[in-house]
Amino acid sequence: MKNIIKKTFFLILIAVISNKSVFSQLSGKAKMLYDSAYAQDPILVKTALTNGAKIFSTSDNNSFYLQWIPDGTTPDATPLIVSLHGSGCNAFMEFKSWYLQAKIHKCGIIAIQWYRYIPNPPLDYFTDDTLYSYIDSALANINYPSNKALLHGFSRGSARTYAMIFNDIQSGNNYFCTTISNAGDADLNYPLYDSINNGNYGATVFMNKHWNLFCGGKDTTTYCYEMKNTEKWLQSQGAIVDIFIQDAALDHNGFQLPSSYKYKDSILNNYLQCYNGTLNVFETDNKKIVSVFPNPFSFSTTLKTTLLFKNASLTVYNSLGQAVKQMDKLTGRTIILHRDNLSTGLYFVTLTQENQVIATNKIIITD
C-alpha cells in the first residue's frame, strides 16, 4: 500500500512540475486556451504531460499544439499522426484517443488546438488558412519530410480535413500521404468545396491522394449516407479511398472508443505502408477499384465492379503480401467472398483476368 501511495504521489508531482513548465512556455492567448483546456478536463492534461507530451505555442502565439514522439526516435524520421479534435473539444482528447495505438505502432502525435473557447460563430474556431498554417509550422519545426504524415480529423475536425489536404497540395508542402476523415463529411455548400466542385482548381484536385473514412450507424450528427456521398465526391476528385469503416453499432464518437482500437490498428497498418512507400503495390486505375460492402465484415462480403469479367480469378493477400485465398472461374460483375478460416485483420483483394489485374481493393475482417 505504501508503494502504491508513493507511486501515485510521484506521478502527481511530475504532472504538477510539468504543468508549471507549460505555464512558463506559453503566454498570451496560447496560455488562455491552454487554461481553458485544463479547466475542461485537468486529468486529460496531466495524463498527457505525464506520458511525455510536450506543449508548444503556435507561430502567432494565438494557440498551442501538443507533440509526443516515441522514446528512442527522432521527430523527422518517425511516422506521425496529425490530429484535429471535434466540436467543443481540445487537443488533449485527441492525445488520449491515439496514444495507446500510436505507442504500439511507434507513431508520433501532433494534436492542434483549434477550438478557441469563444461562443461566437464563426469566431469560435480558427479559419482554414490559419489552421493549416499551424500544421505547417508544427511540421516545419521538426523538418518533417513530404508524403509521410497521417492527417486525422474527428467530427468538425474531420469536416476540415478536406480543406487541410487542399491547402497542403496548393502550398506544395504535400506533408500527408493519407488521411482519416472520421465522422465528418464534406459539406458541398461550404465555399471552398463548392469552388472545387465548380472546377476552379482543376478537374481532380485530390488526384492519387489516399483516404480512409469512418461512420457509425447510430450517428445522428453525421449520417453514414453523408460519408458515402463524401466517398463519391473524393473519388470524383481523383482520391483513392483505401478503407471505409461503417459500423452499425457505433455512434458519432465510435472511432474514439477503446472498442475501436481494432479499426485504428487496421488504418495505422495501412498508413505505415503509405509511410514506407509500399501502399501502391496493389493499386490500379481508380475507376477500376472494386466496391465492397459490408467492409469491415465478419462472415461474408459482396464485391462489385463496373467491369464485366469472364473466367476471372480473385486472390486475397494478407498485409505481408502473401496469397491466403483464391477463387477461380468467376464471371459477371458481382462476387460473394466468404471469410472461411481467415483471421481478423487487413487484406487486399485483386481481381485478375488473362493475367491482367482489372480491379483491386482492401478489406477488413473482424470478429
Image: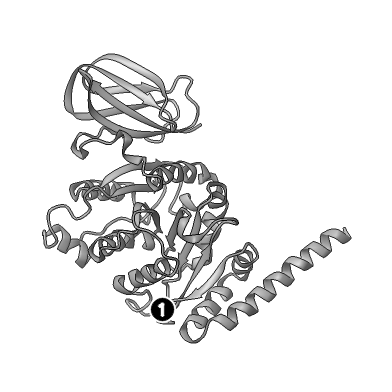
**Residue 72 falls in image quadrant:** bottom right
Residue 231 visible, this orientation: yes
| Residue 16 falls left or right of residue 142 | right
- Relative to residue 196, is residue 64 depicted above or below? below
Residue type highlighted by circle 1: Ser
- Quarter-of-image position of residue 156: bottom left
Q: In this image, 251 relative to 17: left or right?
A: left
Residue 220: give x, y in percent of width and height.
38, 53
Q: Name the side, left or right, on which 284 lies relative to 77.
A: left
Question: In this picture, is 83 found above or below 366?
Answer: below
Residue 67 pos. (x, y %): 51, 65
| Residue sitting nearer the eye, 189 or 236 | 236
Q: Secondary structure beneath disc 1?
A: loop
Residue located 33% across and 69% down the image: 132
Task: Please report the residue visible at 52 percent of the width from the left and 59 percent of the height from the top.
Answer: 74
Circle 1 Cα neighbour tier, 10 Å, few/some/many (<14 / 14–19 / ≥20)? some
Q: Is 227 situated above or below 35?
A: above
Front residue of 295 and 316 = 316
Q: Position of residue 333 (x, y in %)?
A: 21, 24
Viewer-proximal residue among 118 and 311:
311
Residue in the picture at 60% in, 57% down: 71
The colour style of the image is one colour
Name the residue tied to disc 1: 59
